[in-house]
Amino acid sequence: MAAVGTAGSISMTFIYYAAREINCKIVYYGPGLCGKTTNLQYIHDRTNPAARGKMISLATEADRTLFFDFLPVELGTIRGMRTRMQIYTVPGQVFYEATRRMVLKGCDAVVFVADSQAAMLDANFESRIETVFSNAESIERHIQDADLVVGGVLIPGAAAPKLVSREQLSHMRPGSVLVDVAIDQGGCFETSRPTTHAEPTYIIDDIVHYCVANMPGAVPRTSTFALNNVTLPFTLQLADKGAKQAMLDNPHLLEGLNVHRGKVTYDDVARDLGYDYMPALEALEL
Ligand SMILES: Nc1nc2c(ncn2[C@@H]2O[C@H](COP(=O)(O)OP(=O)(O)O)[C@@H](O)[C@H]2O)c(=O)[nH]1
Ligand SMILES: [Mg+2]
């Protein structure tokens, strides 16, 4: 039987032409107790029982993953090939390093599960990433030896503050890159100006600037699905109930109201543009 790896000799994406099968290996990775097993459990619970195999968890009595979890899932037949995902988790505790490496071997994709609790920030990256406080002094220090600076800062209703000045570009390494994710809010570097995917970069003082105003537009299909997954339920509420009732029933929609019958119902916007602010609930009664 021929086994063909799709990404070099260690890949686990085995394509068995004779048996018309494709197997790929996906590993959920992250620190202990970040939710890896819970993710697999969720996939297991949401998958058609006919399409999934048995979920195997090698757990201790304390309900921690000792070695790994394993869940095979059938994706059905793609171009005549029976396609399966073998999903694993790695044990989170660092002292299972050897097991982690075994499980990761030859995987086709890693899903990184981060623990969003502030106290776990460093554990997520096993101290390979150092977090620092965001202030003028540390920005000044860290841009000097950075290869890539990604600026993302949002002040609701206001223009982004300029965190790196033109003068500071001369302290940076020639050829290093500034990416301005806040460009749609005016940009957070003094030298930023909006660019497009057709011509995404420009150079000032030997520093490459990337300031595409619509970055998700690089993956339009994926970003459209992602956005719709989140926004469609709100759109359906507006369509089913009409705008006013939908907002009265759903505080998140109400918070999104900016202007109604000539009144500005978003205080940051009102303050920024010099209009009187009227609470949304009051404006809806006009
Ligand atoms: N609050 C909260 N708890 C979670 C979440 N995901 C998992 N947990 C809980 O965190 C604990 C550890 O989850 P588990 O999946 O065993 O972590 P693992 O060590 O990465 O496999 C369990 O008690 C879960 O119920 C989450 O998204 N939010
Ligand atoms: Mg686990």
Image (cartoon, rainbow, N blue to C red):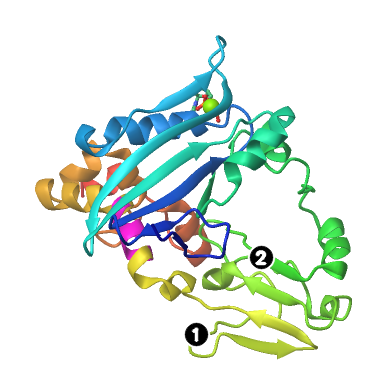
- Give the residue displayed 21% in from the left and 50% down from the top: 286
Mark 2 highlights which residue? 151
Q: Please identify the quarter of the rendering in which residue 143 is found.
A: bottom right
From the top left corner, tell me how far across and down residue 240 is, in percent: 10, 48
| Image height of 85 relative to 262, above or below | above
Q: Position of residue 74 (x, y in %)?
A: 28, 44
Q: Amino acid at mark 2?
A: Gly
**Which residue is depicted at the point 42% across and 43% down?**
86
Residue in the foreground of this view, choosing between 38 and 6: 6
**Side of 137 relative to 221 (left or right):** right
Q: Which residues are magenta?
A: 223-229
What amino acid does circle 1 point to? Answer: Thr
- Residue 121, by quadrant, is top right
Left or right for 234, reference 223: left
Image position of 20 with respect to 233: above or below:
below
Q: Residue furthest top?
A: 61
Q: For the residue with label 1, is its CB less than 8 Å from the closest atom of ligand 1?
A: no
Q: Nearer the viewer, residue 244 or 105?
A: 105
Mark 1 crowdedness (10 Å alpha carbons): few <14, some 14-19, many ≥20: some
Q: Earlier in the sequence, mark 2 or mark 1?
A: 2
Please count the marks in the image. 2
**Residue at numbered disc 1:** 196
Q: Secondary structure at mark 1?
A: loop
**Magenta part mainly helix, strand or loop?**
helix
Query: Going 54% across and 90% down the picture, which residue do you hit?
Result: 199
Quarter of the image that includes the N terminus: bottom left
Q: Is residue 88 visible?
A: yes
Separation (CA) of disc 2 from disc 1: 17 Å
